[in-house]
Image (cartoon, rainbow, N blue to C red):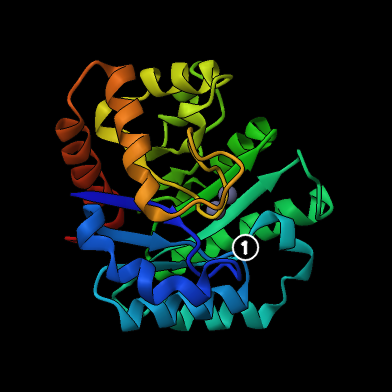
Amino acid sequence: MLIDVHCHLNDPRLIDDAPSIVADFPKDGLLAVVNAAYDRESAQIGAELAARYDSVYATVGIHPHDAVFAVPEDYEVFAELLKRPKILAVGETGLDYFYDKSPRDIQRRVFREHLELARAAHKPVVLHIRDAYGDALDILKDARHCLEKGVLLHCYGGGAEAVKDFSRFDCFYSFGGAVTFNNGEANRASLAAVPRDRLLLETDCPYMTPVPFRGQLNYPKHVRLVALKVAEVLGISVEEVEELNKQNAEAFFKVRF
Ligand SMILES: [Zn+2]
Ligand SMILES: [Zn+2]
């Protein structure tokens, strides 16, 4: 059975269909999904979904795009939600220097604040890093005391070489639709460089739609297309990929799905 470790059912484009998407999980071979927050409202919606559906879990945090809007009360709301057993991690947080939607100094500050939140709540952290892997490494080194429960680099795009650098931390790496892209050679090389016991699968839906559905909305069920490609790249069966993903997801999130 498949687990999508990073999706956005809380996205305005998916939320109205969430009941039917979740109802189809058994038919689609999905055991569970982890819904990632990107701001306070989406965190609250994710928490509601997790409360309503057995197979939905959630994280709480502010995306680097929205870092400029972060206020102290956000962390109070997140700290309360993190007391619930199905709120598994802090995130997605991190740095995005590709879009630069929030000023970089504010992104770095809000990233550090999220790491402190994870430390206080004894939870792992889900990271979104784009074109900022050097700065992310520096911040993680400084905040090593906040990483006791582990780090997940979602949509890992740091390259095969950087896997060594991040593996000095308790780091997991998740891969999504990009592994299926025609121009995804670098992503597939990264995938091959990641230790098997650190590998996870995601969709990041509604974004990152895998081949052959590019240009359409993405859904959690498409994690199967990611699993098939990962199996092909690693030269193992899709059943082995599913089992690895389940074991690793349970190791990272400290829960039995
Ligand atoms: Zn992201
Ligand atoms: Zn995301």
Relative height, residue 77 to residue 122 (above, below): below
The amino acid type of the residue labelled 1 equals: Glu
Residue 172 vs residue 161: left or right? left
**Residue drawn where x is 62% and y is 50% of the image:** 94
Residue at mark 1:
113
Residue 51 vs residue 98: left or right? left
Residue 98 vs residue 8: left or right? right
Residue 109 visible in the current orientation: yes
Relative height, residue 121 to residue 148 (above, below): below
Q: How many marks?
A: 1
Camera-side residue: 99 or 94? 99
Relative height, residue 238 to residue 72 (above, below): above
**Rendered location of residue 65, percent (x, y):** 73, 56
Camera-side residue: 146 or 218? 218
Outermost residue, right direction?
Answer: 103
Q: Quadrant of residue 81?
A: bottom left
**Residue drawn where x is 26% and y is 54% of the image:** 28
> Mark 1: is the Cβ under 8 angstroms from ligand 1?
no
Quadrant containing the C terminus is bottom left
Relative height, residue 135 to residue 94 (above, below): above
**Rendered location of residue 164, percent (x, y):** 44, 21
**Residue drawn where x is 28% and y is 75% of the image:** 85
Camera-side residue: 49 or 161? 49
Residue 209 vs residue 226: left or right? right
**Rendered location of residue 148, percent (x, y):** 37, 51
**Rendered location of residue 70, percent (x, y):** 72, 71
Q: Secondary structure at mark 1?
A: helix
**Residue drawn where x is 26% and y is 68% of the image:** 55
Q: Residues within 10 Å of mark 1 (few under 14, many from 20)?
A: some
Residue 150 visible in the current orientation: no
Camera-side residue: 87 or 155? 155
